[in-house]
Amino acid sequence: MSCNDFSEVELKPMFSEMTFNTIMRMVSGKRYYGNDCDVTHVEQARLFREIIKEIVTLGGANNVGDFLGFLRWFDFDGLEKRLKNISKRTDSFLQGLIDEHRLGKRNTNTMIDHLLTQQQSQPEYYTDQIIKGLIVVSNFNYI
């Protein structure tokens, strides 16, 4: 190659993947992007990437019902239905991560492990809902 051969490289997706991998390694001890992901978690990684993609899509969507309240009853574009669906899928995914750590399948130094330890001493303050909320805030604030 000579110094005159240049190629354009799209860095934004690479930085996004790196950021999500870093955050999720701290939260759950797993990577969900890249070719060197753990083979045992391929389906979980695919689900995580789908959830992120859908959240990004819905995050920029305009809801007509926000401007004209009575139109929310009709949900013309199906936005409300899609939001409820992604909410259920995200909740299920995060509950799976918590249950996996709770059952001891993953014994690592992660945010989930530390929160589950706190849950044992203060169950009223560290419910599963609170833990899932903290994961969402730490992860999806990046979007």
Image (tube, grey):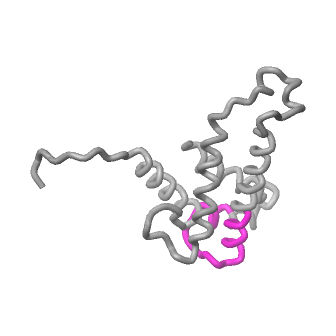
Task: Provide residue 64's location: percent of width, then percent of height.
Answer: 76, 26
**What's the residue at 51%, 65% (across, down)?**
31
**Boundaries of the magenta span:** 95-115
Q: Nearer the viewer, residue 75 or 52?
A: 75
Q: Residue at x 53, y 63 (%)?
A: 32
Against 60, residue 8 (above or below) is below
Q: Quadrant of the C terminus?
A: top right
Q: Quadrant of residue 40?
A: bottom right
Q: Residue at x 54, y 67 (%)?
A: 29
Q: Is residue 126 left or right of residue 26?
A: right
| Residue situated in front as seen by the camera: 29 or 108 | 29
Residue 71 drawn at (x, y percent):
85, 26
Residue found at x 62% / y 55%: 50
* Residue 133 picture location, percent across and down: 71, 50
Q: Is residue 17 above or below residue 67?
A: below
- In the image, residue 61 lies in the stretch drawn in magenta: no
Q: Position of residue 118 (x, y in %)?
A: 70, 62
Question: Is the residue 75 above or below the residue 18 in the image?
Answer: above
User: How many discs appear?
Assistant: 0
- Name the quadrant containing residue 61: top right
Observer-nearest of 93 and 9: 9
Q: Is residue 102 magenta?
A: yes
Secondary structure mostly seen in the magenta stretch: helix
